[in-house]
Image (cartoon, rainbow, N blue to C red):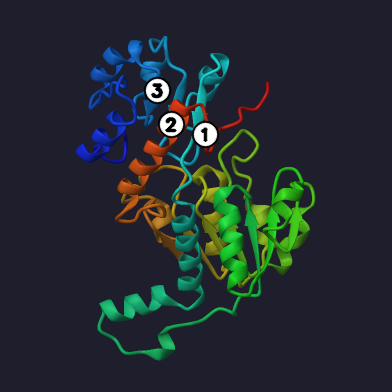
Amino acid sequence: MYSTHKPSGEHLCRLKALRDSLKVIVATTEEEAKAMAPEVEIILGHRYLRQCLAVARRLRWVQSSAGGVDQLPCEGLASRGILLTRTTLSSSVIARHAITLAWALTRGLPQAFKLQASRRWDPAGVSFLSMPRQALVLGMGCIGRTLAAQLRSEGLRVIGVKRTLDESVRAWCDDLRDTQTWQSALPEVDWCFVALPLTETTRHFVDETVMRALPAHAVLVNVGRGEVLDTEALIRVLNDGHLGGVALDVVEKQPLHSDDSLWQAPRLLITPYVAAHEPNRAAALERFFESQVQRYLDGEPLEDVVVFDKQ
């Protein structure tokens, strides 16, 4: 029950070929999903997962098509010992999207696009920010680590921020801070990337104090969760002339309505939650799911297993 695309016929055939006894059924509606749920052992995708969970008595494993799990019924899965795996295939594309947004603001591309749309040749109408030397990455999960690697390959010094210091993560950045020490680095940051999941502790983690601690020229990019950044505070900060630019691929309330005040904020670039999109994603997702099912059938460890927080 995929939420992003309809499974291809070739994909279904490859799944069935993994084992003769394997039965593959597709749910295209909530009613179909709930009717089929009592007999399934594996759910691929999470479109109707909440609706199915209560009746999926034989369920042992859920393979989500998403990277984040904050929208999934993790408590219900954990209480029943159901395995949950996520999908991090898009981390490289998301990281590249985030860096592209940062460069677009740094090089004044939104201003150039407006000039082009109005058919005006005006070099003075495009302003540039200082070339970045140091970046801060909030969240050192798969996206954050990929971001750090790509930024370092471009010559930037990278400060990573993780809830707890982890030596296995330290190698991905030049400096690793925990949530108690990271804010002291803000005044020296040129680019700040938000790649945090949404939890009880990360809601409005990037608040007005954080934004104003960044240099006036700094660029802030959010490709994590919209709720991690305080939108009302962001509007105030931008209207006050602080920050060189902000790019959001996620917002607190999606989709944005046409009368939302966020549209009018200056120096703001918005993409409509498309950082993970690329033409071959569906095919890559299907191949990944197939490889995961093969591992499951063979009794091998699965990739991207979600470790539930202990209560």
Foreground pick, 62 / 248: 62
Q: Are marks 2 and 3 in contact (CB under 8 Å)?
A: yes
Q: Nearer the viewer, residue 246 or 103?
A: 103
Q: Which residue is mark 3?
A: 42
Q: Residue 302 shows which numbered tag? A: 1
Label 1 amino acid? Leu
Provide the residue designation for mark 2: 63
Q: Nearer the viewer, residue 113 or 235?
A: 113
| Left or right: where 100 falls relative to 28 | right
Q: Residues within 10 Å of mark 1 (few under 14, many from 20)?
A: some
Q: Nearer the viewer, mark 1 or mark 2?
A: 1
Q: Quadrant of the N terminus?
A: top left
What is the secondary structure assignment of the residue under circle 1? loop
Q: Residues within 10 Å of mark 2 (few under 14, many from 20)?
A: many
Measuring from the top left, give residue 304's x and y in whole percent. 53, 38
Q: CA distance from mark 2 to mark 3?
A: 8 Å
